[in-house]
Amino acid sequence: MDSSDEEEERTFVRVLSEKYNPENFPYGQGVVVLPSPPGSPVKDRLFLPSVLVLNDCGISKAGDRSDIEAFCAHVLELDLAYNQLNDWEEISTIVSSIPHLDFLNLSMNPLSGVQLQPSVADVFSRVRRLVLINTQVSWDTVHTLTQHTPELKELFLCLNGYDSVSESQASCPSLSLLQITGNQLQDWAEVRKFGRLYPSLSTLVLANNSVSSVGDTKETLEGLFPNLRSINLNNSGLSQWEDIERLNFFPKLEDVKAQGIPLLQSYSTQERRSLLLAQLPSVMVLNGSAISDGEREDAERFFIRYYQDCPEQELPQRYNALVSKYGHLAPLAEVDLRPRGTLVEVRWGDRVEPVTLRLEQTVGDLKKQLKTLLQLPSNGIRLFHIDKEMSSVFGPEELKCGFRALHSYSIQDGDEILVVLKEKNRCSSSDF
């Protein structure tokens, strides 16, 4: 048998038989073995699951229709990604033999230039979720499919090299989710066509395209996308705040993703989220994160302060609306959150040295610092804190615990640290 004959044998039926042959599974409670139809070349096999995953199996043909019908009558989901299917007749034979098929994944099959004839497209009528990622399938075939799938809800057309969108005489009113990530769409005029093709669209994923603008009026966007609730513009080409403002024209939009766009490259992480959020008053989820009432208010106040020194002609449209809501806001006071040094006097015999302490350091750290600074003997030292205000009442307090932080002793500017050598004949657990 030559190699071409071997390839022809990689049918859907044969792969199904190999994967779900009873010899590959241990028998146990709940395992059912179905007998093959009379005369079938397929041996008895396990009761197949309702979700079949047969990707990357080299499938190029359907095989015997009766075998598919016998063993796939209850199948709901079929994943045929990364196979060699390049004939819609073979695909339709498989699909027509699975009467309850809801989900079909044909991703990575070579369907470029292969047209689906309307005469065989009716077999897809039950499919509700269709994945055609990186198949290079033509728009004509896409439209033929959508015209014959009256209950289609989700369509995935990622990585198909589209730089334009072909329109169709018939729309697909059932479609609610379109994912067209990783294509080459640039002009909003092409995106606009989705509104006419899929009038019930609620989720549109345009990530990793080069769409450079949202170029429509309020009336146009309201009419074309009346039900759009979620849009993903990650890694698109948006570079103007006006495009973000136009997102408010989608009447039901509540979920926006807009990461990795040129517009935001010069802003910090906090500025990006706050400025986006303030521009989108109706959005409830931004970049996958829900927006609380407190975060929205903080972002809108930040927006006012960010733009309040700009010339009138450069102010965003949103600015005046927010000023009407909150009024003109005073700039926030700058707060230095760096650890503050505390200046004390360190007394060692007759010598007095001003020393700046970091109060987060420990007593042990301070002893090491002072030994170096004052060139103290190598034998142990004791430290006493003298509070400038309370020393007459409480007297000096010894800093005994080496791992205790200085701030816990309430040391303040102007206090005194007294250094005393330890007596040689004394030792304690606090020695260092």
Image: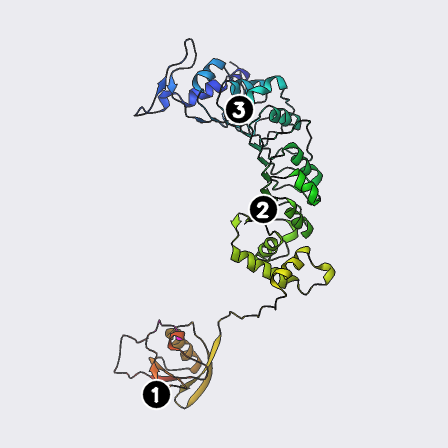
What is the span of residues highlighted in magenta in the rendered image? 402-406
How far is the residue under mark 2 from the one under mark 1?
A: 64 Å
Q: Which marked residue is nearer to the observer: mark 2 or mark 1?
A: 2
Amino acid type, label 2:
Val
User: What amino acid does circle 1 point to?
Assistant: Val
Residue topped by disc 1: 393
Which residue is denoted by mark 2 in the rendering? 256
Judging from the image, what secondary structure is the residue with disc 3 in?
loop
Residue 199: which quarter of the image?
top right
Classify mark 3: residues with Cα within 10 Å, few (<14), some (14-19) or many (20+): many
Q: Position of residue 299 (x, y in %)?
A: 57, 58
Where residue 353 sits in the image (x, y, percent)?
Answer: 45, 85
Residue type (three-letter) at the residue carrying disc 3: Arg
Q: Quadrant of residue 226?
A: top right
Answer with mark 2 or mark 3, whichever residue precedes in sequence. 3
Can you name the residue that lies furthest to the left here? Answer: 425
